Image: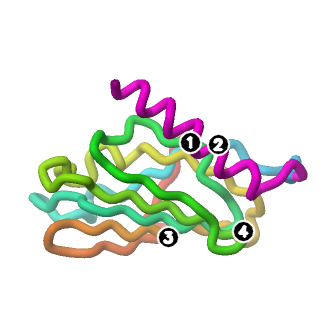
Amino acid sequence: MRKILNACVAVVVTVLALPAIGTDAPAAASPARTLVLPASLFRAGDALQELKVTVDCGYISSLQDIPELWDIKMGFDIPSVQLFHATVRLGAAATEGLGPWARSIRIVSMENDCFSVKVVASGRDQEYHWSGAQLHWAH
């Protein structure tokens, strides 16, 4: 069931991303990298209930190992700003800490001079804001 859900999400992401970036994507676009969220900055004992990611001058290319029972919405604010919003459907499905979300989002940078990623993670008791050097990348 989880594999089917992950495959469906990957297809939706691809369908949503391709029309927005068009067929004239620059040849110099960087390869996809995995966004590594700062689990050490998420308070121990808190559970993630909502995740928002804003990508400037790039796009989310895929989602991997996402937790079950989460609603996911993706779109574009303007052509160069992609918005991602995930919310837990049931309180019991909230992940302890960042759970699988810590390394589940793959992002491609289209233009390095304006590329940026901002993340807002909401736990039960606190809202966390991360960007720039607080975020790390894995290949």
With 44 as the anchor, is 23 left or right in this view? right
Label 4: which secondary element: loop
Residue bearing mark 3: 118
3D distance between C-alphas at marks 3 and 2: 21 Å
Q: Is residue 18 magenta?
A: yes
3D distance between C-alphas at marks 4 and 1: 17 Å
Residue bearing mark 4: 80
What is the magenta range?
Answer: 1-24
Residue bearing mark 2: 14
Mark closest to the chain's N terminus, 1 or 2: 2
Are circles 1 and 2 on residues that touch, CB within 8 Å?
A: yes
Q: Which residue does the image show at 12% across and 50% down from the upper left? A: 92
Using the image, tell me which numbered label, if any, was put on residue 62: 1
Q: Which residue does the image show at 67% across and 51% down from the upper left? A: 17
Mark closest to the chain's N terminus, 1 or 3: 1
Quadrant where the image shows the N terminus: top left
Label 1: which secondary element: strand
Residue type (three-letter) at the residue carrying disc 4: Ser
Mark 2, other Cα within 10 Å: few <14 / some 14–19 / many ≥20: some
Magenta stretch: helix, strand or loop mostly: helix
Residue type (three-letter) at the residue carrying disc 2: Thr
Q: Which residue does the image show at 27% across and 75% down from the upper left? A: 127
Mark closest to the chain's N terminus, 4 or 1: 1
Mark closest to the chain's N terminus, 2 or 4: 2
3D distance between C-alphas at marks 2 and 4: 16 Å
